[in-house]
Amino acid sequence: MKRIEWVIASALVVIGLSCLTMSATSIMSLNTYHVYLSNLFKICLWTGIPVAIIGIAYLIMKRNKKD
């Protein structure tokens, strides 16, 4: 992929995560900056951990396939 495609994909992911965080924060009706950042951190962890596990497994399988 070209650099601009990576930028567009990253921007869409960030926009999606911020919309998800805004909806989670508005449901709790505690519209403070601290609650927003707390929810954003939790959502990023829940999405980042599976991606990291899948990425590590892919790299291990790719390395074992070369040998």
Image (cartoon, rainbow, N blue to C red):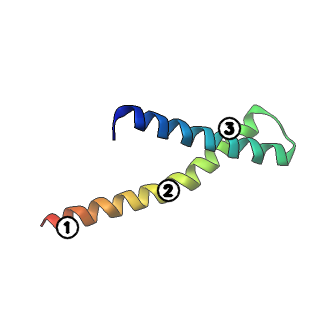
Q: Is residue 45 left or right of residue 51?
A: right
Q: Amino acid at mark 3?
A: Leu
Badge 2: few (under 14), some or many (20 or more) residues near its Cα, within 10 Å? few
User: Which percent across, then down, holds residue 58?
Assistant: 32, 62
In the foreground, 45 or 67: 67
37 over 48 or under it: above or below: above
Earlier in the chain: of badge 3 and badge 1, it is: 3
Q: Give the structural element (helix, strand or loop) at label 3.
A: helix
Residue for point 34% across, 36% down: 2
User: Which percent across, then down, holds residue 57?
Assistant: 34, 64
User: Which percent across, then down, holds residue 20?
Assistant: 69, 46
Residue for point 85% across, 40% down: 30
Dot label at residue 64: 1
2 over 20 or under it: above or below: above
Q: Amino acid at mark 2?
A: Ile
Q: Quadrant of residue 37?
A: top right
Residue for point 62% across, 43% down: 16
Q: Disc 1, disc 2: CB below 8 Å?
A: no
Distance from Cα at disc 2 to Cα at disc 3: 18 Å
Badge 1: few (under 14), some or many (20 or more) residues near its Cα, within 10 Å? few
Residue marked by disc 2: 49
Which residue lies most toward the right here? Answer: 29
Residue marked by disc 3: 37
Q: Give the structural element (helix, strand or loop) at label 1.
A: helix
User: Which percent across, then down, holds residue 42?
Assistant: 63, 49
Distance from Cα at disc 3 to Cα at disc 1: 40 Å
Q: Give the structural element (helix, strand or loop) at label 2.
A: helix
